[in-house]
Amino acid sequence: MKKYKVGIIGATGMVGQRFVTLIDAHPWFELETVAASSRSAGKTYEEATEGRWMMTDPIPDCAKNKTILSAENDIKQISESTDFVFSAVDMKKEEIKALEEAYAKAECPVVSNNSAHRWTPDVPMIVPELNPEHAEIIPHQRKRLGTSKGFITVKSNCSIQSYVPPFHPLREKFSLTKALVCTYQAISGAGKNFNTWPEMIENVIPYIGGEEEKSETEPYKIWGKITGNEIIPATTPLITTQCIRVAALDGHMGAVFMSFENKPSIDEIKQLWREYKGYPQTHNLPSAPKQFLHYFEETDRPQTKIDCNLENGMAISMGRLRPDTQYDYKFICLSHNTLRGAAGGAVLTAELLCNEGYI
């Protein structure tokens, strides 16, 4: 596999920092360019993140002395020097949409962590183990944009990473009809840690702006079908959610209730989870977890602190599957929100797109 030259726009924020750490040791990707707002442009990466570095490991050497470019003003230079960019910019939605399209029209593929283009009909929202076939919409998007190489793909919201993957094989085989999900989401999902958000210590906030709407609707695009030049969202199963911020640093947990048209047994569900493999596993992508869906038999697992880093934070873990009095079954699930749910999921998507020749 060739080495791909990668840029990160929005490189100084928490997700951008996570991208830097993931690319540092990546076998396919080499960090070429870091970009951020005009306030940081011209500084070295180390200078721009001084006092703001949130990762546990130190700033990698691959980024430390790089001069930060302007994500908005240096599009031509960034596009010409990289094979593709990861987008983690913190801007208004319409500004992000315009910026990412500008990169795509400059013939630079964009793998975005942002929500701005999630509902653009010809922009695929990919979870590599679930809907890799959605990449097939890219030629239609290129035709609309008037590009030969440039396009945009996005990853889904971090809140749905814990429950949509275990739903996926069940939906296909046993016709999942409805689900109720309560998520308990870590503070890094807001780009914070306990130093920058001390109010969250020993606290729970029962509201995360926009999160429930995303959690209830984004699964439908993932399960949608390409029809002509757009992705038509699915309409089932019915999903209702509540999203709660809790005093954990990393890891989004879900308490899930589900019912089926063709009710499986508990053993059938566990076997389906255990045996499920997606494109990243069958193609041995570098960031792919070997076991995508893990089930814990212990009654007190999964736990945020000890299980969210499972398989380098890229696996989904479940436990406590049991019958329910109002739904067929209930269970607990967990995902790492800044790895599988953010930068790691985007890196895995980029690996898929490189492996399939879109980049």
Image (cartoon, rainbow, N blue to C red):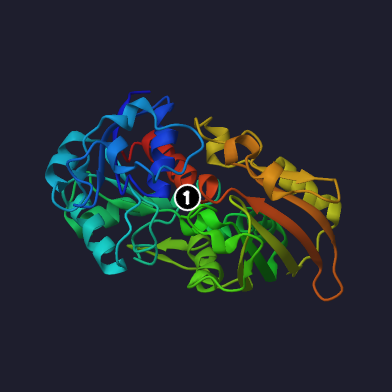
Quarter holding the N terminus?
A: top left
Q: Which residue is mark 1?
A: 342
Report whether 13 appears left or right of 300.
left
Across and down, in percent, residue 176 comes to 69, 66
Q: Is residue 287 left or right of residue 231?
A: right
Residue at coordinates 82% horizontally, 55% vertically from top-left?
320
Question: Badge 1, how many Cα within 10 Å: few under 14, some, many 20+?
Answer: many
| Residue 326 image point, x, y percent | 82, 76
Residue 211 horizontal/vertical position (percent): 52, 69
Residue drawn at point x = 34 percent, y = 41 percent: 50
In-front residue for pair 303/48: 48
Q: Residue at x 18, y 53 (%)?
A: 72
Q: What is the quadrant of residue 351 in the picture? A: top left
Question: For the residue marked with disc 1, what is the amino acid?
Answer: Ala
At which x and y percent is residue 228?
35, 63
Task: Look at the picture and state if 31 lies above or below 116.
Answer: above
SS label for mark 1: helix
Residue 216 position (above or below residue 144): below
Regarding residue 184, the answer to whether it shows in the image is yes
Taking the spot 28% from the left edge, 38% from the top edge, the residue there is 47
Tell me, yes or no, if residue 156 can be seen here: no
